[in-house]
Image (cartoon, grey):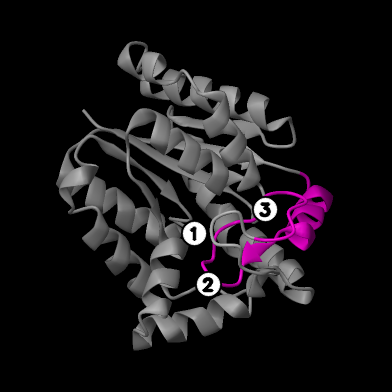
Amino acid sequence: MGLNVIMMGAPGAGKGTQAGRFARERGLPKISTGDMLREAVKEGHPVALEAKALMDRGELVDDGTIIAIVRDRLTKPDTQPGFVLDGFPRTVDQAVALDAIMEERAQGPLVVIDVVVPEEELVRRLGSRRICGTCGANAEPGGAVCTKCNGELVVRSDDDGQVVVERLKVYERVTRPVLEYYRARPTFRFVNGAQAPEQVANDVDSMIDDAAGSGGPAKVAGKRRTSARAADQAEA
């Protein structure tokens, strides 16, 4: 039975960092609709370019496009042992569609983790976040240039000024109901994302293991290397 995880949280909550870390440590693919869309934008796909225009305004891409992207990704062989979803589902319709996809897969339940951070901290984090303008990598805190390619660091277009406020409003209006959709499930958990990154990571691991009932191999795989953790914190 696969270990299928949804990492949720408002923009800036650190769900992408936790999703990437957990996926690497458990040997699972991290599936991020944002990453897939940004890659398609680089390749000049017309649909992706239209989607980027919406993202740059802090709005959500239409459900049909996102569901189709995720459905296709979940057919890949590397998802058979499970996966970690980051940025999907963001609407109740997407959550309903994902349930249908999981039913088709017949590979076990979804474990849903909500990383909770106060709004004022989210605004602070988003306002200080930087990425590389050349390769798109997340910048290390306090860094002057990209550690991967020495490119110039810039503010992400969807982290700028009023877009941050709009993104948080959209999250509350559209995505918050998704949490209510999952809340009654025995595999739903929430984690305090305002703690130190190491503690957040430990809590995420414990919550997922508890929700999935994976007391054996998953916990052994949960031992972390300090160097990998330092890189993860830089992505927050």
Quadrant hosting residue 194: top right
Identify the residue at horizontal 64%, vertical 45% (top origin): 234
Viewer-side residue, 162 vs 223: 223
In the rendered structure, which amino acid carries the disc numbered 2? Leu
Is 126 covered by the magenta stretch?
yes
- Magenta residue span: 118-145
Q: Which residue is mark 2?
A: 60
Between circles 3 and 1, the one closer to the viewer is 3
Q: Secondary structure at mark 1?
A: loop
Distance between the Cα atoms at labels 3 and 1?
15 Å
Q: Which residue is mark 3?
A: 12
Q: Quadrant of the N terminus?
A: top left
Q: Residue furthest front?
A: 150
Residue 236 visible to an observer of this rendering: no
Quadrant hosting residue 129: bottom right
Viewer-side residue, 182 vs 206: 206
Q: Which mark is residue 90?
A: 1
- The reply to whether the C-beta atoms of the residues labelled 2 and 1 are less than 8 Å apart is yes
Identify the residue at horizontal 46%, vertical 38% (top origin): 112
Viewer-side residue, 160 vs 185: 160
Q: Is residue 7 left or right of residue 173?
A: left
Is 224 covered by the magenta stretch?
no
Viewer-side residue, 231 vs 11: 231
Neighbourhood count class around disc 3 (C-alpha, 10 Å): few under 14, some 14–19, many 20 upward? many
